[in-house]
């Protein structure tokens, strides 16, 4: 595992800029190595989309993997953070950035080009929360009790989630997440 202290931290805009400028070279190498026409078609389509990726457009899992290669090649790091995600790609309860409301106080931590942790500051003001719900097109009545709970007062707070099995898989450089679970579940295996 290659990382530095503190690990590299990018804004979402910086990450998208890297993806657009350095990602095509990664995908062109992948295109040359593609074994089938089908694989070549998938990589070619991804290559075209990366070149025109919009600043506020969410990144796909495949984009994240390409960015992981770019981060290793450009910075020599496999552990990094992307901060300040676009408002439109995060849940309604994510706190907008106080400097530029197009962005949020939200982050993801990546290891070897895959997200291992996602988190954000949450909106704690009931009026702001109601405005965000309406802006997202969610019926206010469907979550009114949630919003009402904030009327009694709430401190500024945040939350995050970590996928421990994913961390173990990426840390040990395993090829399948099922190898990190004692009893993996999938459509063909529901009991031990």
Image (cartoon, helix red, strand yellow):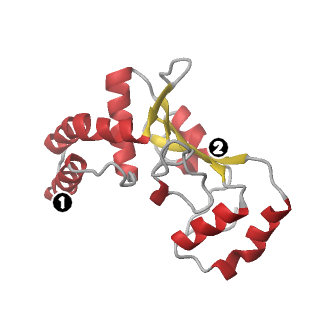
Residue 26 visible here: no
* Residue 91 versus residue 98 in the image, above or below: below
Residue 36 position, x and y percent, is 16, 54
Name the residue at 61% across, 52% down. 95
Identity of the residue furthest to the top in this view = 5
Residue at 62% x, 56% y: name it.
184
Name the quarter where the C terminus is drawn: bottom right
Query: Residue 5, position in %: x, y?
Result: 56, 17
The 10 Å Cα crowd at callout 2, few under 14, some 14 to 19, many 20 or more, is few
Asked whether, in this view, residue 88 is left or right of residue 141, the answer is: left
Q: Is residue 14 visible?
A: yes
SS under mark 2: helix
Q: In the rendered view, would you say 14 is above or below 87?
A: above
| Other residues around mark 1 within 10 Å, as few (<14) / some (14–19) / many (≥20) | few
For label 2, the residue is 164
Q: Secondary structure at mark 1?
A: helix
**Of 79 and 144, which appears nearest the observer?**
144
Q: Residue at x 69, y 48 (%)?
A: 159
* Mark positioned earlier in the residue sequence (1 or 2): 1
Asked if 67 appears above or below 177 in the picture, the reply is above
Identify the disc placed on residue 38: 1
Q: Position of residue 23 (x, y in %)?
A: 25, 38
User: Horizontally, is 63 left or right of 79 in the view?
Assistant: left
Picture mark count: 2
Residue in front for this viewpoint, 58 or 116: 58
| In the image: residue 97, left or right of residue 191 | left
Q: Are marks 1 and 2 in contact (CB under 8 Å)?
A: no
Q: CA distance from mark 1 to mark 2?
A: 33 Å
């Amino acid at each position: 595992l290659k990382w530095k202290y503190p690990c590299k931290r990018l804004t979402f805009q910086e990450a998208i800029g890297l993806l657009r400028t350095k990602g095509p070279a990664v995908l062109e190498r992948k295109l040359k190595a593609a074994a089938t026409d089908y694989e070549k078609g998938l990589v070619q389509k991804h290559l075209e989309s990366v070149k025109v990726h919009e600043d506020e457009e969410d990144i796909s899992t495949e984009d994240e993997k390409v960015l992981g290669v770019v981060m290793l090649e450009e910075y020599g790091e496999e552990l990094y953070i992307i901060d300040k995600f676009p408002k439109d790609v995060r849940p309604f309860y994510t706190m907008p950035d106080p400097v530029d409301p197009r962005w949020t106080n939200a982050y993801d931590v990546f290891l070897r080009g895959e997200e291992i942790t996602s988190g954000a500051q949450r909106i704690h003001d009931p009026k702001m929360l109601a405005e965000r719900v309406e802006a997202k097109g969610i019926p206010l009545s469907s979550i009114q009790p949630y919003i009402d709970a904030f009327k009694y007062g709430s401190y500024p707070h945040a939350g995050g989630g970590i996928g421990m099995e994913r961390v173990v898989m990426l840390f040990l450089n395993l090829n399948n997440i099922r190898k990190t679970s004692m009893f993996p579940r999938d459509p063909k295996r529901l009991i031990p």
